[in-house]
Image (spheres, grey):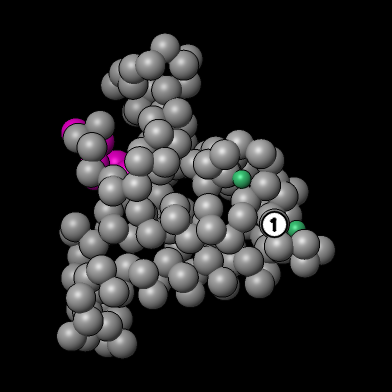
Amino acid sequence: MGVEDPAVAVAVFDAFDKNHDGTIDFHEFAVTMAMMCHGSTHDKVRFMWTLVDQNADGFISKEELRKTLRSLYSIQGKYTNFGDIFPLFHGCSQDCAQRVLANSMAENIFSKADANHDGLVSFEEFHAWALQDSSTFQDVASLFSNLNKIAPEL
Ligand SMILES: [Ca+2]
Ligand SMILES: [Ca+2]
């Protein structure tokens, strides 16, 4: 499939494989994508959480967030030239733009979501952040929606 980081590929797979039988059927995929487009904020938060908390320890580390965002931006980078959207990246390689975008988004989210400053984001913190900072949350949600485009490769 078209995701470079194996850990993210596994997490994407798990998130779609609702009945954990090791396969993703079209129904599971359609249900997940419909939820990502039309679901409540809570549903979207839950879905994102499953993907980002790669070691399933109940917390998001900045590294987990950065790696997930990196993969999501690399998916977006297949369809988008970042230099066209962000003048800042004009003349930068896609790889460089993806790294910078992922790092700055991870820093941005952590600075707002890690309310108790323990260096980790709990589910409650993540959920509270999604409600408070809805414009950034929507940006991230639209990145997750790009998973739709790699569906044929899954
Ligand atoms: Ca974790
Ligand atoms: Ca925290």
Q: Is residue 70 visible?
A: yes
In this rendering, would 88 be left or right of 127? left
| Disc 1 residue type (three-letter) | Leu
Q: Main secondary structure of the magenta part?
A: helix
Tell me the quarter of the image containing the N terminus. Answer: top left
Tell me the quarter of the image containing the C terminus. Answer: top left
Q: Is residue 92 above or below residue 139?
A: below
Res 53 → quadrant: top right
Residue 16 place in picture, x, y as percent: 41, 28
Q: Is residue 64 above or below residue 13?
A: below
In this rendering, would 92 be left or right of 118? left
Task: Find out whether residue 84 is within the magenta segment.
Answer: no
Res 151 → quadrant: top left
Q: Which residue does the numbered mark 1 point to in the structure image?
A: 120
Whether disc 1's CB lies below 8 Å from ligand 2 is answered yes
| Count of picture labels | 1
Residue 139 place in picture, x, y as percent: 45, 63
Query: The magenta stretch spans which residues?
Result: 147-152
Q: Residue at x 53, y 53 (%)?
A: 64
